[in-house]
Amino acid sequence: MEQSQRTDDKGIGLLRGRDGLRLLLSLWDNFPEHMFIIRVDGPDEFIVEAINPAHEKTLGKSTDITGQRIDAILPRDAAEPVIQRYRHCVATGEPYRYEECGYFVDEQGMRQEGHWLTLLVPISDMNGRVHHLFGISKNITEVIRARQEVEAQNRILEERVAERTRELEKANAELKHQATRDFLTDCYNRRHLTEIARLEMERARRYDMPFTLALIDIDKFKAINDQHGHNEGDRTLRALATCLRKAMRRPDILGRYGGDEFLVLMPETDITGARVISGRLQDTVRKQCGQTISIGLAQLKPSDGKLESIIERADRDLMSVKESRKKSP
Ligand SMILES: Nc1nc2c(ncn2[C@@H]2O[C@H](COP(=O)(O)OP(=O)(O)OP(=O)(O)O)[C@@H](O)[C@H]2O)c(=O)[nH]1
């Protein structure tokens, strides 16, 4: 049988006895949390019947709210949620527990915002009509403030972590860039270029596609360094890299192989196509950089075991181009 429906006096006999009322009043007077009784006069009519001394203390000495309607005590926007909760409790006939925000008067008489955990219990007549609500509100202001403080700290920490993550990602991207790029010209460095070249070789073999390398050397580069200084030589290398990048086709890959030598990887291109592209590169470089370049080409053969063998062939081709240039400049 439900606790509220029990008819015997077991356990509550004391309350039914002579001293019961005095005991309950003493509890009401000494209970450290808010206690209140609301009379239900209609769907929107909730009258404060009584509040215990702890509740009175919180409201401040000058405030007497007993006998008043909730919507007469509180401003409209504050009264509305309170009335809704009371209505809910009346409608369901069940106890209702909720957190609420309100104001209290502190030791110095100052009005402060506070938080309460309230348990509302409906009291019904024989027909089940709820005629009163009994409430207990525990002050949880400190708990809520501590929770808000932790949440604020968490937000600060999360922001710091996010900021640190962004910095690390940026540093990683920068490191990756530095590891793969030539510091002078910003095109791929030899190590990264040869890694890509090996992958392209494998891809060409697997899909039976042509693959050609172009080894590019600046003509008489030593003379630029000797006559105009190393800085001018560096500037020429940078200008050449920019010029080649602009003149190349999108899928082709440029890197600095070393010194004044650049390597262009041409996937899906045979030696005939590579010759056409090389001629175009030489024209562009001559017109835009005022420089001539020699180009050695080599196409991947089935007999090429390692990348080095195809590069060696391109190098030999470059040497013979240079030799023939020297013979007929
Ligand atoms: N300024 C500059 N010079 C470099 C750099 N790396 C290599 N060199 C110079 O590039 C020159 C390369 O010389 P070579 O390719 O042998 O000579 P070249 O004058 O181009 O001769 P040909 O290729 O036969 O026309 C050398 O003088 C190197 O010192 C660099 O990063 N900056």
Image: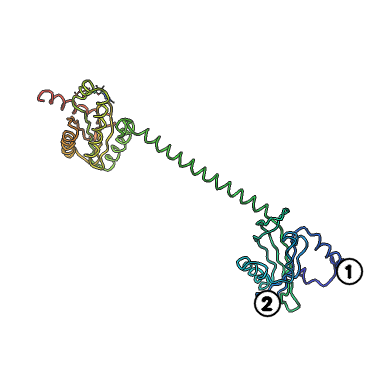
Judging depth in this view, the residue of 196 and 58 nearest the camera is 58
Q: Are marks 2 and 1 in contact (CB under 8 Å)?
A: no
Left or right: 9 in relation to 245: right
Q: Residues within 10 Å of mark 2 (few under 14, many from 20)?
A: few
Report the residue marked by disc 1.
Answer: 17
Corner quadrant of residue 52: bottom right
Judging depth in this view, the residue of 214 and 169 nearest the camera is 169
Q: Amino acid at mark 2?
A: Gly
Q: Earlier in the sequence, mark 2 or mark 1?
A: 1
Q: Which mark is residue 219?
A: none
Report the residue marked by disc 2.
Answer: 42
**Outermost residue toward the bottom in this view:** 127
Left or right: 209 in relation to 57: left
Above or below, 307 relative to 146: above
Residue 303, position in %: x, y? 24, 33
Where on the image, by quarter, is ligand 1? Answer: top left
Report the quarter where the N terminus lies.
bottom right
